[in-house]
């Protein structure tokens, strides 16, 4: 058992809880810290040169490969799906997050209860509320932040613009048309 | 007449003819198009001069030099726009 004493004004309260409650309570904070460190590491890492190939290198690579249209389209779809997934926020995690947030708020209110009721609330309600809060709200926010910093949204727009440009260039060059349609 | 030709369908048709000339039905099956759509696109490609009917090859469809150029243009363009990874061939020759 772990014991801790909180002094509030003139009264002191001693809480006791099993050892397993400590890692459970701290897990959300550790997860956030690891994610933050990972982003800092990624932010300072040099980008792979393959992300922005030059025209010459693409031509040379095509000469040495069997890459066909279907294979390239499959890779394109994978990239687009990945980019879209990175910029989406789904509804269910958001609801879970709000429920978690509400639970954390109720935990705050519960602290006004007599000390005998506070101990289980402190060690159980807080982590139970914190985990969906992180999964539902902090995680999507983190992904949005990562997407915005990593330029996922800009990359998605660049791909769509590039495709439109490729289409008009194709029809100007091979079809004698300004734009199809 | 196609109002707005789909670049991805054109790519599939050109890819189908890239290795060797094919009969119409073979190309239609390879591209996975229904007959009406296939006919429209084929007519479109014939009109642009990207595909022709081979005289020596039993009337099979084949890519013209312009068609080969167009196919390369599409492959290079798509690879460049999306930064795709093109793996070298593993042929043993």
Image (cartoon, coloured by chain):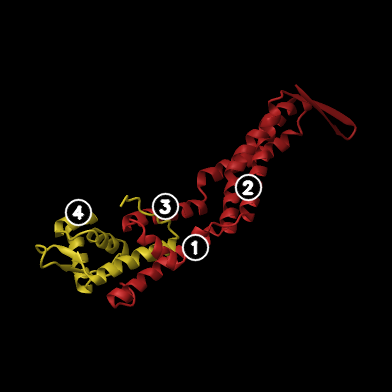
Chain colours: A red, B yellow
- Of marks 1 and 2, the one in the foreground: 1
- For the N terminus of chain A, the image quarter is top right
Mark 2 — residue? A38
Mark 1 — residue? A52
Mark 3 — residue? A78
Q: Position of residue B93 (x, y in %)?
A: 30, 52
Q: Are marks 1 and 2 in contact (CB under 8 Å)?
A: no
How packed mark 1 is, by other alpha carbons closer than 10 Å (few <14, some 14-19, many 20 or more), is few
Q: Is residue A121 visible?
A: no
Q: Secondary structure at mark 4?
A: helix
How packed mark 4 is, by other alpha carbons closer than 10 Å (few <14, some 14-19, many 20 or more), is few
> Residue drawn at (19%, 64%), measured in percent from left and top?
B62
Chain at numbered mark 4: B
Real-space Cα separation, disc 4 to disc 1, in angstroms:
35 Å
> Residue drawn at (36%, 73%), measured in percent from left and top?
A169
Q: Are marks 3 and 2 in contact (CB under 8 Å)?
A: no
Real-space Cα separation, disc 1 to disc 3, in angstroms:
17 Å
Q: Position of residue A49 (x, y in %)?
A: 52, 59
Q: Position of residue B30 (x, y in %)?
A: 22, 54
Real-space Cα separation, disc 3 to disc 2, in angstroms:
24 Å
């Amino acid at each position: 058992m772990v014991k801790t004493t909180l002094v509030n004004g003139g009264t002191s309260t001693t809480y006791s809880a099993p050892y397993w409650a400590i890692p459970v309570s701290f897990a959300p904070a550790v997860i956030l810290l690891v994610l933050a460190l990972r982003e800092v590491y990624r932010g300072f890492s040099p980008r792979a040169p393959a992300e922005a190939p030059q025209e010459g290198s693409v031509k040379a690579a095509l000469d040495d490969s069997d890459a066909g249209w279907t294979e390239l389209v499959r890779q394109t779809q994978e990239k687009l799906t990945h980019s879209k997934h990175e910029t989406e926020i789904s509804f269910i995690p958001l609801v879970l997050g709000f429920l978690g947030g509400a639970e954390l708020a109720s935990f705050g209110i519960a602290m006004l209860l007599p000390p005998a009721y506070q101990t289980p609330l402190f060690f159980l309600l807080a982590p139970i509320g914190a985990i969906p809060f992180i999964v539902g709200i902090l995680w999507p926010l983190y992904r949005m932040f990562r997407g915005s910093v990593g330029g996922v949204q800009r990359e998605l727009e660049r791909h769509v613009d590039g495709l439109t440009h490729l289409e008009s260039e194709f029809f100007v060059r091979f079809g004698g048309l300004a734009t199809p349609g | 007449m196609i109002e707005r030709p789909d670049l991805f369908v054109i790519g599939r048709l050109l890819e189908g003819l890239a290795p060797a000339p094919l009969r119409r039905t073979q190309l239609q099956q390879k591209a996975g198009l229904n007959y009406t759509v296939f006919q429209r696109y084929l007519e479109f490609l014939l009109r642009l001069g990207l595909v022709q009917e081979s005289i020596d090859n039993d009337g099979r469809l084949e890519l013209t030099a312009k068609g080969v150029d167009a196919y390369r243009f599409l492959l290079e363009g798509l690879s460049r726009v999306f930064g795709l990874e093109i793996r070298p061939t593993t042929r043993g020759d």
